[in-house]
Amino acid sequence: MSTPLIQVKDLKKEYRTEEVVTKVLHGLSFSIDKGDFVAIMGPSGSGKSTLMHILGLLDRATSGTYELEKENVNDLSDDELASLRNKKIGFVFQAFNLLPRTTVLDNVKLPLIYSENKNDPDKRAREVLESVGLKHRLNYFTNQISGGEKQRVAIARALVNNPSVVFADEPTGNLDSKSGVQVMEILQKLNDAGNTIILVTHETYTAEHADRIIKIKDGLIFDDFKVANRRIARDGEILK
């Protein structure tokens, strides 16, 4: 039996102001194994983005436990969380979050500036860009490439540190359908190669590219199931 990569138990999150307490997550428990491709689904306001921020070490839970590779992250300082996030986690966002007026290559190299592994960052960035089909765009500025290419740059940047898990937050939300299929194809190929992918989306069509779907509503898990007829993207098209 494999050891979970992620183990969450009774996770709760609330935000407080002087007069108001807003409860967002109400006690979530689940595990994700290494090599899984999991989609977290839910409507706007369901808590899925808050959950992703906690799992991605961008925020802390109010209570409950979260273990990443058997390490309880609740016990870590902010600096320790930042270091762990840089080593273990890659992010792909809907808005790309690329540096403007900066080349594709330099955007992908950026996480390596803060990494302990500084062996030939230029070579490593070129390798991951080639793996997402952007070898011909290395020296282009990010305002000179298409939306689909920007998302592939973001995926390359997420992979450059060899993370334990890649979070993709609505990665097709700003793309046309063809570019969206190409992005999902890359994520599926990464998963086929052994990478753990956690996809956050409100779209059933996108979620069905994963092997498993966790559905959240009003801060609670109301369904968690294996995808029976997974959508497979290859060569820019959906095979099934």
Image (cartoon, helix red, strand yellow):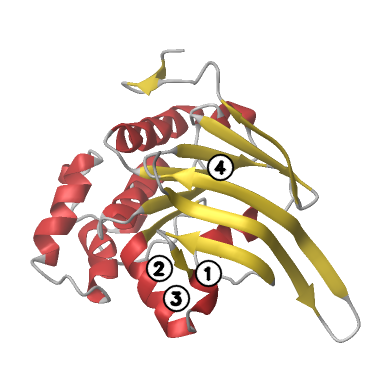
Which label sits on residue 58? 1
Q: Is residue 202 left or right of residue 148?
A: right
Q: Mark 4 points at which residue?
A: 173
Query: SS at mark 4?
Result: loop
Q: Which amino acid does label 3 sit on?
A: Leu
| Placement of the N terminus among the 4 image quadrants | top left
Sequence-first disc among 3 and 1: 1
Which label sits on residue 81? 3
Q: Where is residue 167 in the image (x, y as percent from the top left)?
A: 46, 51
Say whether marks 2 and 3 touch (CB < 8 Å). Answer: yes
Which of the 4 image quadrants contains residue 89?
A: bottom left
Q: What residue type is labelled 1?
A: Leu
Q: What residue type is labelled 2?
A: Arg
Q: Is residue 174 left or right of residue 165?
A: right
Q: Position of residue 140 (x, y in %)?
A: 23, 54
Extreme right residue here? 19
Q: Mark 2 points at which residue?
A: 85
Residue placed at 80% from the left, 78% from the top? 16
Sequence-first disc among 3 and 4: 3
Q: Look at the image and tell me whether residue 232 can be seen.
A: yes
Say whether marks 1 and 4 touch (CB < 8 Å). Answer: no
Q: Distance between the residues labelled 2 and 3?
A: 6 Å
Q: How far apart are marks 2 and 1 (CA)?
A: 8 Å
Q: Is residue 182 left or right of residue 135?
A: right
Q: What residue type is labelled 4?
A: Gly
Query: SS at mark 1?
Result: loop
Q: Where is residue 122 in the image (x, y as percent from the top left)?
A: 12, 63
Extreme top residue here? 240
Residue placed at 51% from the left, 39% from the top? 38
